[in-house]
Amino acid sequence: MSTKNPTDWTIAEARKSLEAGETSALDLARAFLDRAASVEPAVHALLERTTDRALSDARAADARRAKGERGPLLGIPVVLKDIFATRGIPTTCGSRILEGFVPPYDADAVERLSRAGAVLVGKSNLDEFAMGSSTENSAFGPTANPWDTGRVAGGSSGGSAAAVAAGECLASLGTDTGGSIRLPASYCGVCGMKPTYGRVSRYGVIAYASSLDQVGPFARTVADLADVLGVIAGHDPRDSTSVPAPVPDYAAALDGRVAGLRIGVPREYFVPGMAPEVEAAVREAIERLRSLGATIVEVGLPHTKYAVATYYLVAPAEASSNLARYDGVRFGLRKAAADANLLDMYRETRDAGFGAEVKRRILLGTYALSAGYYDAFYLKAQKARTLIRDDFAKAFAECDVLATPVAPTVAFGLGEKTEDPLAMYLSDVLTISVNLAGLPALALPCGFDGAGLPIGLQLIAPAFREEAALRVGDAFQRATDWHERRPPAPGAAKGGAR
Amino acid sequence: MSDAPDYGPWEPVIGLEVHAQMLTESKLFCGCSAKFGAEPNAHTCPVCMGMPGVLPVLNRRAVEFATRTALATGCEIPRIARWARKNYFYPDLPKGYQISMYDEPLAVAGGVEVETPEGTRRVRLTRIHMEEDAGKNVHDAHDDHSLVDLNRAGVPLMEIVSEPDIRSAAEAADYLRSLRAILQYLAVCDGNMEEGSMRCDANVSIRRRGTTELGTRTEIKNMNSFRSVERAIDVEIRRQIEVVEGGGRIVQETRLWDADRGQTFPMRSKEAAHDYRYFPDPDLLPLVSDPAWVEEVRRGLPELPAARRDRFVRDHGIPPYDAAVLTARRDVADYFEAALAAHPNPKSISNWIMGDILRLVRERKLDDALVITEWPVAPAALAKLVALIDDGTISGKIAKTVFEEMVAGGGDPASIVEKKGLRQVTDTGAIEAAVDAVIAASPDKVAEYRSGKDKLFGFFVGQVMKATGGKANPQAVNDLLRSKLAG
Ligand SMILES: [Zn+2]
């Protein structure tokens, strides 16, 4: 069929070729492993290439196909953010503190991908413990943006986004706590979705902020996302916050129709300081949706301005507790001088094991939960969270889906914001509210700036209505070709591929 | 049930916090066994070891156990109970936090009835909440490092907190006994303080009798028997009285009981000064109580110790103290009723249980078990023994011999009596012959007796019993001796 290189395919194209017997899972695995080998020196999307595992997964997938089995992800090469526990494969979470840790269990999403016959190509880079917006907080070095290797991939799931963009896999999984899927998807010009909180099990996903963390997919098209989401979504009794609601057939929901749909545009999301090209591209995308038959309505989300502050109390508070288990006692790094006592061991281990941003958030969170501050910080943040959630409930009384930019700017330069944590935190200003409200949201490319860097559109849906955002995103992609662009071979000259 | 010591013009004010380990099959948040005695770390999994990414899943059975306890102690069950994280670092705490409950506990506002020398008193309960236990650090195996055993980590606990309603050390112990009886009746905790399945901390303060203001309190920890609790609290009350009477002030602190030295000592303040940074656990949903389910649990509650005690007094004519002893353990009360069903002599059966049976139970430490199954003699056998006394087949004295035989070798009391020829001799002819022989053999003693030395009567009874191998009917012996010696 396609004359394109397989590493430029979508899942749908790969599946067609597999089903036609024109290629095999093993061929695909080899092609993607080769591609990874060639681009990794420039991109560093992966912390580990699971070559042996990929080849054995691929052989197993081919054997299953030979027996007549079919499935949306059978034989499809995938990458997992290194925050997912993988049985027998080192899992670092981008941190030195998990040095040597090999989980004896798979995350639920990993089990579901395995059952579906996906082929694991590698584990991807991330900001340490998913704390960051650029993947520069990884203890193992940053990931570069495949569109311009002098720029960040976004974070915290930067490796998973860059791996899809650079053609190292056809889909990947990330986690999104404050924008960690949508921001890197936007920066890397791929599609990414943060599902409703509770839609995908968190079992086996190393916790950053438990009430916000959610697993989601990256892929080149919205239709591909729907395939992956259909596989990983569903109730898991091992995660008490996973919701026992039926999972719709997402792929079937993509009927290309947006006529009559009300698309809300929140006025608070076009913030001062937003890059004009970003605003222009997003507004143009919204106009395109109008031309496809959608009704555009302006809505208000008045508590948006409290979202970043709220997030930076809730998330670090939970993180300060979630990260207490890294104490050098049972697994991972242990630092202790010969004459060290218990307290010394804790101090030395955590000092050596955690990076600066993780320490900063542990301190922030510890402070927010401390006696005398709890009411003023943690409780107040919970109240603000309720107000933000109520904003969305009111907005969804007037519209079916919200359309916004993903981020105020395109990908920034490596090292540009590492010295200014507050500027870094503001990268998530347009994504954080969605996590606080627990809603599903999709990021997809909607244009490029003058330097050839991708711009992302965010589509937010009501809880457990992922298919609403996916339908709009898919309809948009049927009418546009932004998602068909591929970055130049990484390592080649800077700039876009127009 | 104990005597109140005299603290002069001072009134102690005591509240207890009891941690009761629940007898569920598995741990509170994972499927690991909650049983004792396995090899270190045999009962562990990624969840109770606090590995990255794993999540707690609530054991519904533990909620049922705690709810039973709450209902049995008259607590209210609020609509919402919330899990909270209690954050602190310690090697036996794998996650660096304990999943507990904080400002929204499972149950509030209950009470436990306690028998005191002044009658029944109700000690109010502030709250009952659930939490997971920690593991155990082992320090003595190696010189240069400690080991951690996580078998106990995640075992479900109930924390039962009383109001400061207790007024003496003895009453504290009585409260604990009453509470333990309830837990054992409910089969939710085996109540073994020595093994730590029931643990107790005490908040102690003193005030002048007649005043109502609370004094500064200290918290006493490390008491691992009922006796320790009573002694430690008594010692602490006296220490506080001494401090105050000496013009000093009580410092609010945690003190550890040292049973060997018989004193409490302040815990290092660094260990005591914790900010646990409680916050709702985002990994668990709040418990929303379902009134229909709570009613179902309530309907399933067994008869509780206090009710059973009153019934024994009322229906069987047992004195209140005896009834309290019999009902302190559900299995003992069951034993009593089983024996009673076979032979309706409550007084005598109660005496046998409170005497010989419970003595053997204690000697053999059978009461370590939640439910005693290996009784020294079966209740039906004890009933038969009492029946043999009551129908005159054997005397009470011979019954003791038969009882020892039953304990030693088992067997039916009637066959033991037959085999050993222990049947009571009621044939007056045979007894008369023995009486005559004894009188004939001791002319001097007979003379002394007749001259007024009444005390010698016992000597003659003894001689006759000896001659008849103890089997003579004591009443017949007495009657014959009295008439023959009278001359
Ligand atoms: Zn376990």
Image: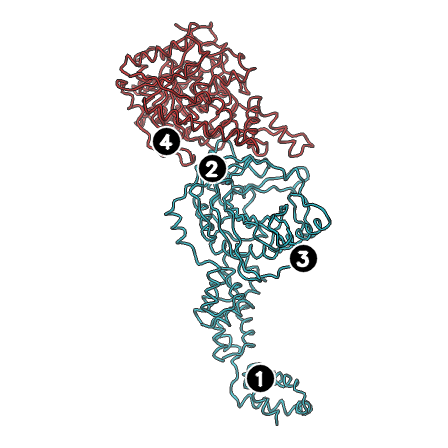
For the residues tagged 2 and 4, is the chain the same?
A: no
* A53 with respect to A259 (left or right): right
Q: Gap in Å between the C-alphas at discs 1 and 2? A: 74 Å
SS state under label 3: loop
Choose the circle earlier in sequence order: 3 or 2.
3
For discs 3 and 4, the disc positioned in front in the rendered view: 3
Task: Tell me the red chain.
Answer: A
Q: What mark, if any, has residue A234 been given in the picture?
A: 4
For discs 1 and 2, the disc positioned in front in the rendered view: 2
Label 3 sits on what residue type? Gly
Task: Tell me the cyan chain.
Answer: B
For the residues tagged 3 and 4, is the chain the same?
A: no
Q: What mark, if any, has residue B56 been given in the picture?
A: 2
For the residues tagged 3 and 2, is the chain the same?
A: yes
Label 1 sits on what residue type? Thr
Q: Quadrant of the C terminus of chain B?
A: bottom right
Label 4 sits on what residue type? Gly
State if disc 4 and disc 3 touch (CB < 8 Å).
Answer: no
Which quadrant of the view contains residue A352? Answer: top right
For discs 3 and 2, the disc positioned in front in the rendered view: 3
SS state under label 1: loop
Q: Residues within 10 Å of mark 4 (few under 14, many from 20)?
A: many
For discs 1 and 4, the disc positioned in front in the rendered view: 4
Label 2 sits on what residue type? Pro
Q: Gap in Å between the C-alphas at discs 1 and 3? A: 59 Å
Q: Which residue is mark 3?
A: B8
